[in-house]
Image (cartoon, grey):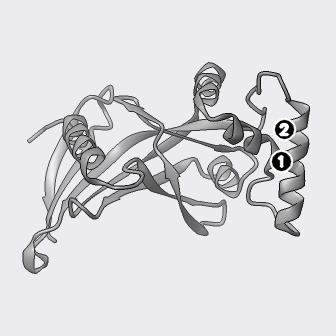
Amino acid sequence: MTHDPFPLFETWFAEARETELNDSNAMTIATADASGQPSARMVLLKGHDRTGFVFYTNQESRKAADIAANPQAAILFHWKSLRRQIRIEGALSTVSDDVADAYFATRSRDSQLGAWASDQSRPLDSRATFETRYDEVKTRFDGQHVPRPPHWSGYLLTPRRFEFWQDREHRLHERRVFVRDGDSDGNVWTEGMLYP
């Protein structure tokens, strides 16, 4: 049986936007470094379509180093209010500069300045040091457009596997899996089910 996971994702995501109090677009992203050491953290989904799922980060961060060494990842949406989760696995690639610039321009000015001030994931001796750096960046760009830092961009996860998990009473959960046909152009998916 072959179906398409994207309409189901759209339905569940739309329902989550109605029911989740905070950050319905929050997702866990799990990466692994060159040695296979895993790491997971929360990020925000900032775009999606049939090509995949986009998030943004500092490209000098730990997650970016993991991605450079091993460009495979898994993302997880968990919506407690709906008792649902979606797991998605696939390959990561960097978005184009035009796409990254367009998204960066939509961020609040304070968030834009923070992207310049932060050495994300690196050791910080005190909060005061970061606040001083932020103030310096704020002064530097006073009255000016804040461009996207060269070390800040987005990643696209191109899915090859989806799992839709629906909580049921007595742990009799429903799990639907979609796997992309490796011989197709990316539009052919095989659907199956898993035991809870």
x then y, percent, for residue 162 = 29, 49
x then y, percent, for residue 68 = 67, 47
- The residue drawn where x is 27% and y is 49% is 16
Q: Secondary structure at mark 2?
A: helix
Of all residues, the one furthest to the bottom in this rendering is 170
| 112 on left or right of 25 | right
- The residue drawn where x is 91% and y is 33% is 140
- The residue drawn where x is 39% and y is 57% is 76
The image shows residue 156, relative to residue 84, as above or below, that is above
The image shows residue 181, relative to residue 173, as above or below, that is above
The image shows residue 88, relative to residue 98, as above or below, that is below
Callout 2 amino acid: Lys
| 92 on left or right of 76 | right
Q: Which mark is residue 134?
A: 1
x then y, percent, for residue 173 = 13, 69
Q: Based on the displayed image, in which of its 4 quarters is residue 153 positioned?
A: top right
Q: Which residue is mark 2?
A: 138
* Circles 1 and 2: CB atoms closer than 8 Å: yes
| 151 on left or right of 55 | right
x then y, percent, for residue 178 = 23, 47
The image shows residue 189, relative to residue 184, as above or below, that is below
Q: Nearer the viewer, residue 105 or 187?
A: 105
Q: Nearer the viewer, residue 37 or 18?
A: 18
Callout 1 amino acid: Tyr
Rate crowding at label 2 as few (under 14), some (14 to 19) or many (20 or more) other CA atoms within 10 Å.
many
Task: Classify the position of the C terminus by image quarter.
Answer: bottom left
Disc 1/disc 2 C-alpha distance (Å): 6 Å
Q: Secondary structure at mark 1?
A: helix
- The residue drawn where x is 31% and y is 32% is 183
Q: Nearer the viewer, residue 101 or 140?
A: 140
Q: Based on the displayed image, in which of its 4 quarters is residue 35 positioned?
A: bottom right
